[in-house]
Amino acid sequence: MDTVSLPLSEAWENQYDLPHPKARVFSLIEPFRRLEPAELDALATIAISKSYEKGETLFHEGTPCVGIHVIAQGAVKILKTTPAGRQIVLAGERAPATVAEVPVFDGGDYPATVVAVQPTESLLILRADFHALCRRNPELPLRFLEIFGKRLRTLVNLVERITFGNLRQRLAQSLLDFAELAGANTFAMPETQEQLAVRLGTVREVVSRNLSRFQTEGLIRLVRRDVEIIDKQGLQAEANTAI
């Protein structure tokens, strides 16, 4: 049996009575958690451990899909890049989670790029192995349909914000997304103000001015690139302001 051990937290290791650390990771993720222990252990033996530093790319948009990635530790952002080099973050995912679900089913290339926003551990299930798992467990693809539905809702909300939302709304939502990725209300901004401005379709000075306004209004505390969300409900209200 594969003896590779991920640096899982003590809480994770003690929560499930499974001998393999990778199996314990799979047992925490909704589509896999209802599998029998023997199936989880079998899955653990074929999963390939991958490690990424902050800023490293798990896979690039347009490259052939190798398999599905299970984020065991850390966090990633899913982004698209325009021919002009502008980037837009479609979503963020914190462990435990999966990414690259769509191409592993439809056989197409990766539709977006995935980048680690902090040190990240991933378990890669090769596409052929994933298909074999689905054939043995016909209910598994149905569970992934729930993930597809959530992804679609996220994209619809993103299109709505970009199309109809103002800059303050988009900036407030970006701060909330950063906090969710960090798993805390205090975090270091994973993007410079220049990068954030490009993604939001504006210039750095406008981003800086609105961050200062958020601070004056008591929504956040900002020290260089360190952000503390003081009034999360207020920031959420700003992000959801009716147009």
Image (tube, grey):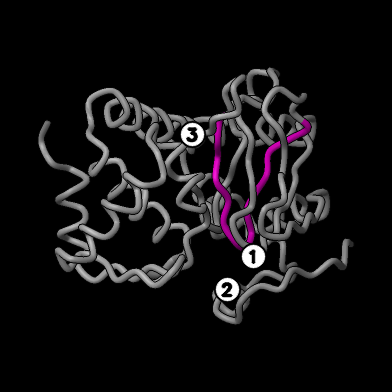
Residue under circle 3? 88
Magenta-colored span:
66-80
Q: Are marks 2 and 1 in contact (CB under 8 Å)?
A: yes
Tell me if mark 2 has few (under 14), some (14-19) or many (20+) residues whose alpha carbon lies within 10 angstroms of its own: few
Residue, x 55% and y 46% (percent of image)? 77
**Spatial separation of the CA atoms under disc 3 and disc 2:** 33 Å
Q: Which is nearer the N-term, disc 2 or disc 1?
A: 2
For this rendering, which residue is in front, 32 or 178?
Answer: 178
Residue type beneath disc 3 = Ile
Reply yes or no: does residue 70 show up in magenta.
Answer: yes
Residue type beneath disc 1 = Arg
In the displayed structure image, the side of residue 50 where residue 195 appears, left or right: left
Residue, x 23% and y 32% (percent of image)? 165
Q: Which is nearer the N-term, disc 3 or disc 1?
A: 1
Residue, x 58% and y 71% (percent of image)? 16
Tell me if mark 3 has few (under 14), some (14-19) or many (20+) residues whose alpha carbon lies within 10 angstroms of its own: some
In the displayed structure image, the side of residue 170 where residue 104 appears, left or right: right
